[in-house]
Image (tube, rainbow, N blue to C red):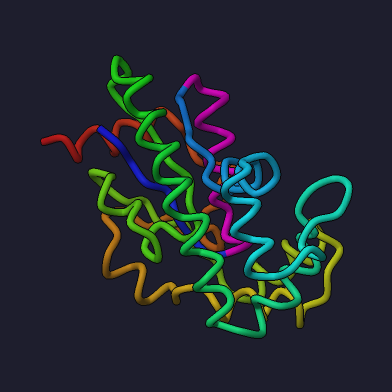
């Protein structure tokens, strides 16, 4: 069974996924794979340069701050970037699933699960949510950015109310901190999905 874990920026989904990894479960990290593709895949790189120009890349790889400053002001540019990256990530995910077919339970972490075709490849969805105030505080502290910068990212993500309708299980990290969550109880609950 493949379980998708999603949620907005700063919701706590990565913390949950790290707990799952510590417990021995395999989790496909779409953000990490997307970054790797943007930095190292020649075809993806060329398409990004075609879209944003040569300034898109610096010596260490994709100039994420520069790209973010453009796409979070322009839904059209964001959509075009996603059309480059999402299919490449999906292809990597499909290969990863085939390579790990002996596992009885696989997880995929994706903030954009419902915005991409990836939700079609999972059996169940776990949504991690938190209030905007909590998310702002977490991301500002984690990334050293301003509240305005975080809000510009939040506004481009699907709302919690929309995602709740499409999810099988919701964890509210305002009510229950992820570090308090028992992985074994969580896995037992996930296994009930099979029935």
Give the residue drawn at x 76%, y 82%. 148
x then y, percent, for residue 106? 36, 30
Quadrant of the frame with the C terminus: top left
Residue pushed farthest top? 102
Bounds of the magenta segment: 9-24
Residue 70 horizontal side relative to residue 158, left or right: right
> Is 72 a magenta residue?
no
Nearer the observer, 151 or 28: 28
Q: At which x and y percent is residue 67? A: 73, 68
Q: Nearer the viewer, residue 164 or 185?
A: 164
Q: In the image, 65: left or right of 79?
A: right
Percent of width and height locating residue 131: 57, 72
Q: In the rendered image of this protein, does residue 45 appear above or below residue 94?
A: below
Left or right, 55 with reference to 112 = right
Indicate whether 103 appears above or below 147.
above
In this rendering, the answer to whether 27 lies above or below 52 is above
In the rendered image, the quadrant that contains the N terminus is top left
- Report the number of numbered marks: 0
* Position above or below: 83 against 131: above
What secondary structure is the magenta-colored segment mainly?
helix
What residue appears at the point 43 percent right and 41 percent down from the top-left corner?
A: 108
Instruction: Give the x, y percent position of residue 60.
Output: 85, 45
Residue drawn at the location 30% of the way across and 36% of the way down: 2
């Amino acid at each position: 069974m493949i379980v998708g874990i999603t949620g907005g920026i700063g919701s706590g989904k990565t913390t949950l996924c790290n707990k799952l990894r510590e417990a021995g479960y395999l989790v496909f990290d779409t953000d990490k794979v997307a970054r790797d593709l943007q930095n190292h895949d020649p075809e993806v790189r060329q398409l990004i340069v075609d879209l944003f120009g040569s300034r898109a890349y610096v010596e260490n790889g994709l100039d994420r701050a520069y790209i973010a400053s453009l796409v979070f002001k322009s839904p059209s540019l964001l959509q075009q970037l996603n059309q480059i990256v999402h299919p490449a990530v999906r292809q990597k995910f499909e290969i990863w699933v085939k390579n790990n077919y002996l596992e009885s339970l696989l997880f995929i972490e994706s903030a954009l699960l419902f915005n991409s075709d990836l939700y079609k490849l999972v059996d169940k969805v776990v949504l991690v949510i938190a209030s905007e105030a909590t998310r702002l505080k977490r991301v500002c502290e984690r990334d050293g950015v301003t509240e305005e910068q975080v809000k510009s990212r939040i506004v481009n993500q699907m709302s919690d109310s929309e995602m709740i309708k499409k999810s099988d299980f919701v964890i509210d990290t305002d009510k229950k901190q992820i570090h308090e969550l028992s992985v074994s109880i969580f896995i037992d609950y996930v296994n009930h999905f099979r029935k």
